[in-house]
Amino acid sequence: MTLYNFSAGPAILPKSVVEKAREGLADLDGTGIGVMEHSHRGKAFLAVYERAEAACRRLAGVSDDYDVLFLQGGASSQFFTVPANFLAADQTADYLVTGSWSQKAVKEAERYGSVHTVCSSEDRNFCYVPAERRYSDAPVYVHFTSNNTIYGTEFREEPAVPDGAFLVCDASSDVFSRPLDVSKYGLLYAGAQKNLGPSGVTLVLVRKDLVERGSSDLPTMLQYRTHASKQSMYNTPPTFGIFAMGLVFEWIEEQGGLAAMAEHNAAKAKPLYDFLERSELFTPTADADSRSLMNVTFVTGDEATDKTVVEQATAAGFDGLKGHRSVGGLRASIYNAFPPEGVTDLVAFLEEFERTHG
Ligand SMILES: Cc1ncc(COP(=O)(O)O)c(C=O)c1O
């Protein structure tokens, strides 16, 4: 039986990456010492670090105006690190609220300054990305979550940003799944464990002038300048995670880069959305114009049936399909590394389920 991993994160990684990581675990680049056992200050790991950073810069066209940081604490730590650095008590930051990760980001920002809600899709359990947006007069920055992992929605393009503000993005669940114009962003962060590698490392792309602007009245580890000035090595960095992320960046390059990734992802999700459109049993939960290419969420409308589908799918080798508890139903997470045949096989399984249970 073929086993397909639909986990929302940590998630499937490219096979070739896992194999190279396995070799590196035992012996990094012929040094006779495994990557986890090398000093982060030694030549061998520095080479790993520089390769990862260079591949990241090539992939997304990250210019020298930006720092590339590999941090710890997950995307959740960026929820407070961003406002801690940039939002003073008498200032306002604008947030687009499109799911519970955005809500969590808002909650942390409120500890530091005022938060203005530009838009919210909470009225319909976050099943869409609102088109109508109202900004505050002079926000410091605008924050959005490019892909809403739990609700299966995704921004088609970056939101507008009022003059004088900069754009901040939580791109945890769709980073490097499509082309990225980094110059539109002041800061972009992403936990690695969906599209980039193992959990425990967070990629941050941040404009250098913002790094300088950040508050210096913070614990050292909370200041971006600390990490930017020390190649993310002020303290011991997550060496294995950085190594694996570098391998993933190189794998994406081998696939043809971000434009090719976007094509693959669109072609991969299409058969599943097409099936959900024609199915009389299953319904996609997200509005058509907001659907995510990374997390496809759907329901039968009956909890017991959803449960049966998940049970039978799991037994048939489709692992990790249970929807997040706040939405229920099913969720197929089909990040960059997920194989297209896993989607077509799933469609065949769902079709058969519908034929026998519909
Ligand atoms: C969009 C988004 N933001 C933030 C997080 C939280 O990430 P972490 O667990 O790395 O803190 C997740 C995790 O699933 C997510 O999907």
Image (cartoon, grey):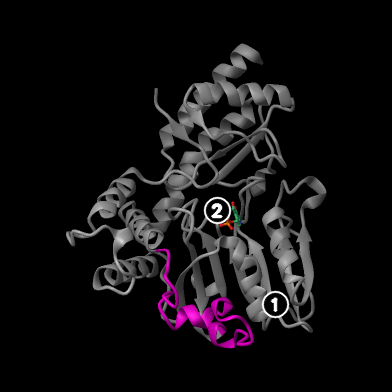
The quadrant of the rendering that contains the N terminus is top left
Residue receiving disc 2 = 173
Compared across the picture, whether 224 is left or right of 99 comes to left
Instruction: State whether residue 311 is above or below residue 33.
Output: above
Residue placed most toward the observer, 234 or 345: 234
Q: Is residue 47 above or below residue 347?
A: below
Q: Quadrant of the C terminus?
A: top right
Kindly indicate the quadrant of the structure image that contains residue 77: bottom right
Between 115 and 347, the one lying in front of the other is: 115
> Which residue is pictured at 55% across the width and 68% down the height?
188
The numbered mark, 2 or 1, whose residue comes first in the sequence reads 1
Against 349, residue 173 (above or below) is: below
Label 1: state its secondary structure.
loop
Examine the structure image and report whether residue 219 is included in the region drawn in magenta.
Answer: yes
Mark 2 touches mark 1? (CB < 8 Å): no
Q: Is any part of residue 97 visible from this angle? A: yes
Q: Residue 312: which disc?
A: none
> Which residue, as the protein is rendered here, is positioned at the far right?
123
Residue 292, given in percent of the width and then of the height, sits at 59, 47
Q: Amino acid at mark 2?
A: Ser
- The residue stretch that appears in magenta: 210-238
Residue 211 at what x, y percent from top left?
54, 83
Looking at the image, in which quadrant does ligand 1 appear? bottom right
Q: Which residue has dot 1 on it?
A: 162
For the residue pair 212 and 62, the one nearer the viewer reads as 212
Cβ of mark 2 under 8 Å from ligand 1: the answer is yes
Left or right of residue 279, residue 337 in this image: left
Q: Residues within 10 Å of mark 1 (few under 14, many from 20)?
A: some
Residue 243 is covered by the magenta coloring: no
**Left or right of residue 316, residue 291 in this image:** right
